[in-house]
Image (spheres, rainbow, N blue to C red):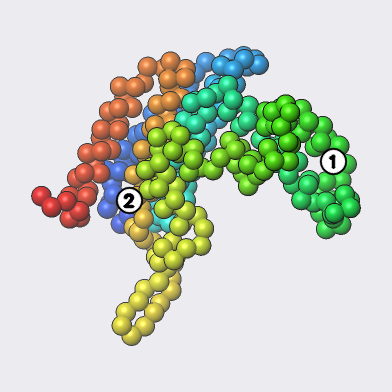
């Protein structure tokens, strides 16, 4: 993306209302996008350091693309959908921080979890007699042995020797690759407040919830109207959250490859903090 802000964004009522945030977001996206060129191609090996660099880079690239999507959706007045993606930028950062805390254990649980999930899916697809259910048999046709082979290769990361296999695996079900839920991951990484404010609250826009559905209804004393239209609703929190956690993810990625970008990133974070303060004062949030 090499366009200037005026070329990148639609000049509409939403852009004009939050122009400083949109322009800062685009500048940060360009900075993050160009930073990819600062990482020279490197040869992966089986070392812990190599695996950690690989996972951190994947999480960063995911956040970069998601961040761009948030900017585009917000500009088009789709703040509710952008809120869901802003939540993803926090989720990526939380995952990165949790893995960094104890990489020798977490990195292998995270990388190999897809093989464990396939085993869980296979177990659910079987009837009590051990045969595959007819309605899902086609999904596992000729794949059962390969799924089991892969599972037995990675089982060591989830079931310690001498422990009961079934009881050990229970805590890894329902998407819990770390063996704990995301709330616990947040507490373990000192991100509990961030979890409550971002991940939990933004889930109202990811799953059906009265809060997330409130923007599609216009009520007066005499009538109710339902419509979808260009709206600035939820644009501010979506931009604020996505910019912040993308920058924090970029910061950790930069440290992993010793890029020396901490000063620039801190400057962006300070600019964001000032914009947030000025906006909240403007809308009357502060009594000054």
Left or right of 41 on screen, residue 116: right
SS for tag 2?
A: helix
Please name the residue that numbered disc 1 is placed on.
Answer: 144
Q: Quadrant of the N terminus?
A: top left
Q: Quadrant of residue 216?
A: bottom left
Q: Residue at x 83, y 51 (%)?
A: 126
**Residue with the most extreme left position:** 288
- Mark 1: give few (<14), some (14-19) or many (20+) Cα within 10 Å: some
Q: Residue at x 84, y 41 (%)?
A: 144
Marks 1 & 2, CB-CB < 8 Å contact:
no
Residue at horizontal 36%, vertical 38%?
244
The quarter holding residue 71 reads top left
Image quadrant in which you'd find residue 41: top right
Q: Secondary structure at mark 1?
A: helix
Percent x, y of residue 86: 43, 45
Q: Residues within 10 Å of mark 2 (few under 14, many from 20)?
A: some
Residue annotated with mark 2? 236
Q: Mark 1 to mark 2: distance in Å?
A: 48 Å
Q: Residue 51 at x, y = what percent?
A: 60, 21
The relative height of residue 104 versus residue 129 in the rendered view (above or below) is above
Residue 218 visible? The answer is yes
Q: Earlier in the sequence, mark 1 or mark 2?
A: 1
Discs 1/2, front: 1
């Amino acid at each position: 993306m090499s366009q200037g802000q005026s070329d990148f964004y639609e000049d509409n009522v939403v852009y004009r209302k939050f122009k400083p945030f949109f322009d800062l977001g685009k500048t940060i996206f360009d900075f993050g996008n160009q930073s990819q060129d600062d990482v020279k191609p490197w040869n992966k090996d089986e070392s812990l350091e190599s695996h950690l660099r690989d996972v951190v880079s994947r999480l960063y690239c995911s956040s970069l693309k998601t961040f761009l999507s948030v900017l585009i959706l917000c500009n088009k007045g789709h703040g509710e959908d952008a809120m869901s993606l802003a939540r993803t930028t926090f989720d990526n950062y939380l995952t990165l921080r949790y893995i960094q805390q104890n990489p020798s254990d977490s990195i292998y649980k995270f990388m190999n979890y897809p093989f464990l999930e396939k085993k869980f899916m296979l177990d659910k697809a079987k009837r009590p007699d051990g045969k595959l259910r007819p309605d899902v048999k086609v999904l596992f046709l000729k794949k059962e042995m390969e799924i089991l082979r892969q599972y037995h290769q990675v089982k060591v990361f989830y079931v310690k020797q001498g422990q009961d296999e079934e009881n050990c695996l229970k805590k890894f079900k329902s998407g819990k690759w770390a063996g704990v839920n995301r709330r616990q991951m947040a507490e373990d990484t000192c991100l509990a407040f961030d979890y409550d404010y971002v991940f939990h609250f933004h889930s109202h826009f990811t799953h059906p919830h009265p809060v997330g559905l409130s923007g599609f209804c216009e009520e007066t004393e005499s009538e109710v109207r339902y419509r979808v239209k260009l709206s600035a609703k939820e644009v501010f929190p979506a931009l604020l959250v996505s910019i912040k956690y993308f920058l924090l993810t970029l910061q950790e990625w930069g440290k992993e490859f010793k890029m020396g970008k901490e000063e620039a990133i801190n400057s962006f974070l300070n600019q964001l903090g000032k914009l947030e303060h000025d906006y909240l004062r403007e809308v009357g949030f502060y009594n000054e």
